[in-house]
Amino acid sequence: MIWLVSSILLSASLMLLFRWFTIAGIHTQTAIVINYLVCIITGTMLAGRKHIFRAELPFLPWFWPCLALGVLFIVVFSAMGQSAKVAGSALTAMASKMGLLIPVLTAVLFLGEPWSWNILPGLLFTLGALFLLNPARQESGHAMDLKAVGLLLLVFIGSGLVDAGVKLVQYFFLKNSSTDQTITLIFTGAFFTGLLQHLFAKGNQRLLPSWKDTTGGIILGLCNYGSMYTLMNALDRSGMPGTFLFPVNNLGVVMVTTGAAYVLFQEVLSRRQLVGLGCATLAILLLSMGS
């Protein structure tokens, strides 16, 4: 359970850091690239002699799946940024969190994890909670178009595939490699993809990071690596099925972020969001009955 709690707290810190970046004037895209570099350095140091920078690495069975998963990290992030502009941040956040259905169904349909009576109502309460916890209004101020619908669908599928990919990598490859090796390789794919995206982005006039960007990126990287490390260990060592772990992790991040935002940024919960927290509690109780 300690791995799951740590993953929730560290993942929530990422959301709060992004909010702080806006207040502090930190260039988010630059900090994200630095963050992945910090993740690579951290993983290499923790892996010690088992670091990933070896000649035989491309021939190991878990090399390409982990690298592809890292690329997917950046693709989903870019889709979320575009979707927030077109469809609004509220609908984008909702689409991202609803993606938890994909890893849950993946665990049941392809990994042989049990389907019990409590999973369906637990997932229904999960979706209800995530809907209620997000802002009710659409921020774009205009009617939905096909581009917005397509971006929201991409965010939904992409976010779910990221979580499902983490689960599949843990299930098939973590026995042949250490957690540090696996995570470092995933972040390596994300770093080089993000770096190329940053260097060749149209209209990007801020190629060199400021000291604030660097500091923000270092803090973000340490929290980001920690969130992934604890999630992988929760999947590998806790004995909890994915049908329980992923919904609880997602809902836990939402609840912790909401509470911390109220304390740190004076964000007041509406009645609608309080009802959402109640649904989240019921979802966790239902899903925990099958663990």
Image: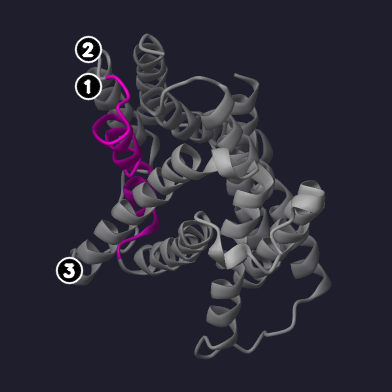
Residue sitting nearer the eye, 176 or 83: 176
Q: Are marks 3 and 1 in contact (CB under 8 Å)?
A: no
Q: Secondary structure at mark 3?
A: loop
Q: Tell me the residue that label 3 is attached to.
A: 145
Q: Is residue 66 above or below residue 266?
A: below
Residue sitting nearer the eye, 263 or 114: 114
Q: CA distance from mark 2 to mark 1?
A: 7 Å
Q: Which mark is residue 117?
A: 2
Q: Residues within 10 Å of mark 3 (few under 14, many from 20)?
A: few
Q: Tell me the residue that label 1 is attached to.
A: 120
Q: Secondary structure at mark 1?
A: helix
Q: Is residue 291 magenta?
A: no
What residue type is disc 1 on?
Leu
The picture places residue 277, in percent across and down from the top left corner, at 42, 23
What residue type is disc 3 on?
Asp
Disc nearest the viewer among 3 and 1: 1
In screen coordinates, is 135 left or right of 256? left
Q: Is residue 239 above or below residue 12?
A: above
Disc nearest the viewer among 3 and 2: 2
Q: Specify the quadrant that holds the C terminus.
A: top left
The picture places residue 6, in percent across and down from the top left corner, at 65, 30
Q: Are marks 2 and 1 in contact (CB under 8 Å)?
A: yes
Q: Residues within 10 Å of mark 2 (few under 14, many from 20)?
A: few
The reply to whether residue 65 is in sight is yes
What residue type is disc 2 on?
Trp
Q: Provide the residue span drawn in magenta.
A: 87-114
Q: Is residue 2 above or below residue 191?
A: above
